[in-house]
Amino acid sequence: MDRKYLVVGAGFAGAVYARELAEAGARVDVIDSRDHTAGNAFDYLNEDNIRVHKYGPHIFHTSNERVFKWLSQYTEWVDYKHKVLALHTDGEYYTLPVNKETSMLVGEENVADIFFKPYTKKMWGISLEELNPKILERVPVRDDYNEYYFPDDTIQKMPKDGYTVLIDNILDHENISVRLKTPFSYDMEKEYTHTFNSMPIDEYYHFIFGELPYRSIKFQTVTLPQKNVFKTATTNFTTWEGPTRVTEWKNFPNHGNNPGFTTLTYEWPCDYKTNQKERYYPVKTTDGLSSAIYNKYTEIDNKRMTFIGRCGTYQYLDMHQVINQSLAGSKKYLKEIL
Ligand code: UDP
């Protein structure tokens, strides 16, 4: 195929598009403004030999066999079923998502006040009532005793050698070239048949319909001279102030072996404008304001470009959803042109 494509962003969305196009015989240039691949799934071994996910914990979970099968071409897996505990101000740990035991211990009538209102206010900077209720459907209250964070997903694993290696394996194809520290510029477009772009759609269009709001996170990472601090990989806090949660990296499987030290990352949510415009979470409110702005951008007729991924499509997507959408999108595109 004598076609050349530009993929903006070397995260999951970009990597999947690049690979599928390359497999179909096209040449693909992948650019990323950061100095590493893997987007927000980027992980690395720190100086204490502990694997840290630079942009917060990524836990692979899905019930989508197709996504799992596709990814399994590029990684081996280790089994891991995510558990989260909430450390309450009474000093006790409670299972999350709230299950029957949690409800019984704190009283059903107190569940929202303890586990949802403070966390949501810290996380989004708005009240529970203002937040699009779809977001809370991610952590539904259960009427059983299940203790897992993703109780309904049939496949739950971690890539054996981490996400960066997994994404580098996806990008490792003779038709794909990757250029890091290379931000998108408009003059690049004309050299390519089509561009698959994971940059923020509002930024691409110079914010003509207004800015799309995002939440960001400031990560505070500490290494302590202790074997272990918390019981689970993630611990959420029920306080109104301070960080939302902490990840103790060692508590994930294959995340380093260090009997004397443990690395912890605390998450402090903030507006993305106060964190060097690092966009992590699209902010969807009950008034539908941000979705209305996003829809305006999608109405622009742009046949030479497809927006992909969390920032390109302004969706709160998990990894398996990004991969699924990117597989479907690339297949559809290839079907149309071949
Ligand atoms: N949430 C909450 N309390 C918790 C955990 C989550 O109120 O202890 C709410 C909060 O609004 C959060 C949303 O549920 O933003 C989704 O949580 P999830 O753990 O899925 O967030 P992610 O891991 O994607 O940051």
Image (tube, helix red, strand yellow):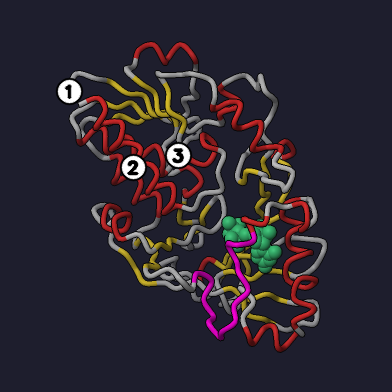
Residue 97 visible? The answer is: yes
Residue type (three-letter) at the residue carrying disc 3? His
Q: Determine contact: label 2, label 3, CB under 8 Å.
A: no
Q: Which residue is mark 2?
A: 328
Indicate left or right for 45 with 107 as reference: left
Q: In terms of secondary structure, where does tag 3 sit?
A: loop
Q: Earlier in the sequence, mark 3 or mark 1?
A: 1
For the residues labelled 2 and 1, the Cα–Cα distance comes to 20 Å
Q: Quadrant of the N terminus?
A: top left
The residue where tag 1 is placed is 1
Residue found at x 43% / y 30%? 180
Q: Circle 3: is it few (<14), some (14-19), or many (20+) Cα within 10 Å?
A: some
Disc number lying in front (3 or 1):
1
Q: Give how far apart the Cα atoms at labels 2 and 3 are.
A: 26 Å
Classify the position of the C terminus by image quarter: top left
- Residue 245 visible somewhere in the drawing: no
Q: Residues within 10 Å of mark 2 (few under 14, many from 20)?
A: few
Q: Which mark is residue 36?
A: 3
Q: Residue 263, position in %: x, y?
A: 58, 65
